[in-house]
Image (cartoon, rainbow, N blue to C red):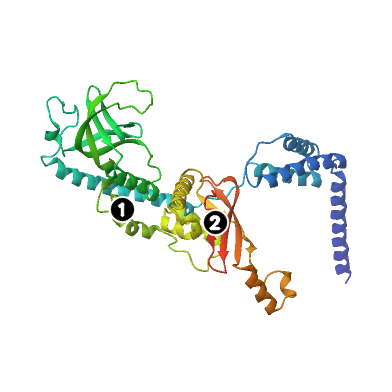
């Protein structure tokens, strides 16, 4: 019994000694003056407020931010053990990091669409090279072709009857650099005074068919292909004209004789081969276009918009349609009232091209915030405090006089670049739903 008592007394003594030591150490910690801590926190709060206003965007530090860091550093150097100073130091570290912009980890899954794009480029490029070789092989083996485009045939030695209908391959076709208008028609000049001239007429369907096919290739397969450049053009000689091959209003060169060429096909090695086809409604096709959906479909992560889609999910599907170049799905996401006329469809395609460019160059991933939904027209029973005061008859009457129910949802998105850094500020996307039908995107022009 005495032994147990001695042990208890000894343990109590150890605890008391520990408490005294801890108290002594706490008393020994030099405390920073409260006024200095308060002043440092004043500037630090202004720093943190600016971070909130920046909404994830990086910004350059100004007077308040630098003053906050300076004051906290001085306190930390003088009073390293003070808990209040340590708390300010940790807040300052976090604020400085957040001032560089919000970050996330970019996973391989987020970049799959870019890998798939490279696969499609290779596949369609190989197909174009193969079809061009086969198509021109047959032509070059026949009698109706100029085996060598330059120097061009001399008009004083060769008549138009001898060249009429013959194929010619022009490797130096530059559009729109060589574009000009004369004789009330539009041409692209190829050649020079010493080599001779060809004037490719581009004011007809023979040009628009393959050129529009080339634009579809850019829109649906390879956005990186420049809209202009030096291409190979296959055409037929159909006439001879004297024109001034210059785009400027003030002409500085003399009129030139040249062979008029009607386009048949455009070829860009390793990319695409677009052929004029008068039997096609669109006037032409690019290599593989007739099998495009069959080739692309296995790479789609989303193929349709569910009838019960939520606003947040619809915005995600909208982003996926652009990343995966699924134009039909893109249209399915958008309010049909924004796609009724030719000019509206033209606007849709214009912004489709802009969206493609942004996902190719500016950002790779999009995240959505929770939707904010409100009624902007009509009456929606079952929501709000009004239901407490209205019976079913009154609600039905209000619905009748209010007309169509239109709801609007706002979904804010954040976009992230390939380094995981937030691009720009969060963007609002507005969606509409009529009479409890399906949600549709209204402001499709909005970047992410």
Label placed on residue 228: none
Q: Where is residue 121 in the image (x, y as percent from the top left)?
A: 35, 47
Q: Quadrant of residue 197?
A: top left
Residue furthest front in the image? 184
Labels 2 and 1 touching (C-beta < 8 A): no
Q: Position of residue 387 (x, y in %)?
A: 71, 73
Seen from the viewer's position, the closer of residues 72 and 286 is: 286
Task: Count residues near mark 2 (Cα–Cα under 10 Å), then give few for <14, some for 14-19, many for 20+.
Answer: many
Q: In which quarter of the image is the N terminus?
A: bottom right
Residue drawn at (16%, 27%), measured in percent from left and top? 155
* In-image side of 408 versus 206 (left or right): right
Residue drawn at (83%, 39%), measured in percent from left and top? 39
Q: Which structural element holds mark 1?
A: helix
* In-image side of 335 versus 239 (left or right): right
Residue drawn at (29%, 42%), measured in percent from left and top? 204
Label placed on residue 289: 1
Q: Position of residue 120 (x, y in %)?
A: 35, 51
Seen from the viewer's position, the closer of residues 10 and 119 is: 119
Q: How far apart are marks 2 and 1 (CA)?
A: 30 Å
Q: Is residue 326 visible?
A: no
How many numbered circles are shown? 2
Q: Which structural element holds mark 2?
A: loop
Q: Earlier in the sequence, mark 2 or mark 1?
A: 1
**Residue assigned mark 2:** 442
Residue drawn at (69%, 47%), measured in percent from left and top? 52
* In-image side of 369 versus 298 (left or right): right
Q: Is residue 308 visible?
A: yes
Above or below, 167 against 301 in this view is: above
* In-image side of 66 versus 13 (left or right): left
Say which of marks 2 and 1 sits in front: 2
Seen from the viewer's position, the closer of residues 58 and 447 is: 447
């Amino acid at each position: 019994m005495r032994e147990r008592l001695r042990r208890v007394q000894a343990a109590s003594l150890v605890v008391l000694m520990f408490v005294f030591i801890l108290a002594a150490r706490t008393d020994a910690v030099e405390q920073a003056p409260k006024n200095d801590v308060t002043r440092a926190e004043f500037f630090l709060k202004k720093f943190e407020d600016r971070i909130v206003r920046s909404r994830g965007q990086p910004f350059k530090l100004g007077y308040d931010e630098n003053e906050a860091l300076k004051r906290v550093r001085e306190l930390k150097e003088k009073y390293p053990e003070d808990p209040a100073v340590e708390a300010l130091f940790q807040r300052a570290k976090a604020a400085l990091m957040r001032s560089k912009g919000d970050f996330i980890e970019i996973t391989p899954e987020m970049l799959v669409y870019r890998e798939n794009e490279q696969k499609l480029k290779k596949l369609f490029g190989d197909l174009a090279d193969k079809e061009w070789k086969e198509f021109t092989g047959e032509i070059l083996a026949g009698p109706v072709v100029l085996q060598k485009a330059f120097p061009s045939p001399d008009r004083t030695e060769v008549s138009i009857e001898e060249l009429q209908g013959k194929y010619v391959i022009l490797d130096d076709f530059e559009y729109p650099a060589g574009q000009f208008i004369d004789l009330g028609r539009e041409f692209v000049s190829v050649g020079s005074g010493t080599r001779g001239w060809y004037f490719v007429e581009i004011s007809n369907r023979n040009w628009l068919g393959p050129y529009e096919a080339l634009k579809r290739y850019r829109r649906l397969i390879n956005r990186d292909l420049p809209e202009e450049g030096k291409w190979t053009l296959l055409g037929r000689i159909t006439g001879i004209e004297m024109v001034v091959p210059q785009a400027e209003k003030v002409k500085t060169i003399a009129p030139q004789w040249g062979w008029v060429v009607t386009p048949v096909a455009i070829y860009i090695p390793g990319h695409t081969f677009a052929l004029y086809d008068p039997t096609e409604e669109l006037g032409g096709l690019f290599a593989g276009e007739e099998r495009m959906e069959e080739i692309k479909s296995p790479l789609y992560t989303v193929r349709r918009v569910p009838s019960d889609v939520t606003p947040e999910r619809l915005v995600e599907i909208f982003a996926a349609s652009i990343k995966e170049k699924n134009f039909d799905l893109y249209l399915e996401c958008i309010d049909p009232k924004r796609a009724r006329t030719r000019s509206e469809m033209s606007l849709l395609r214009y912004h489709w091209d802009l969206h493609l460019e942004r996902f190719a160059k500016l950002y790779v991933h999009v995240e959505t915030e929770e939707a904010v939904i409100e009624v902007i027209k009509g009456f929606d029973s079952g929501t709000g405090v009004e239901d407490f005061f209205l019976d079913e008859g009154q609600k039905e009457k209000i619905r009748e006089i209010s007309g169509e129910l239109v709801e609007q949802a706002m979904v804010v998105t954040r976009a992230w670049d390939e380094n995981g850094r937030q691009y720009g500020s969060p963007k609002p996307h507005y969606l509409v739903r009529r009479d409890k039908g399906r949600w549709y995107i209204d402001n499709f022009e909005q970047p992410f």
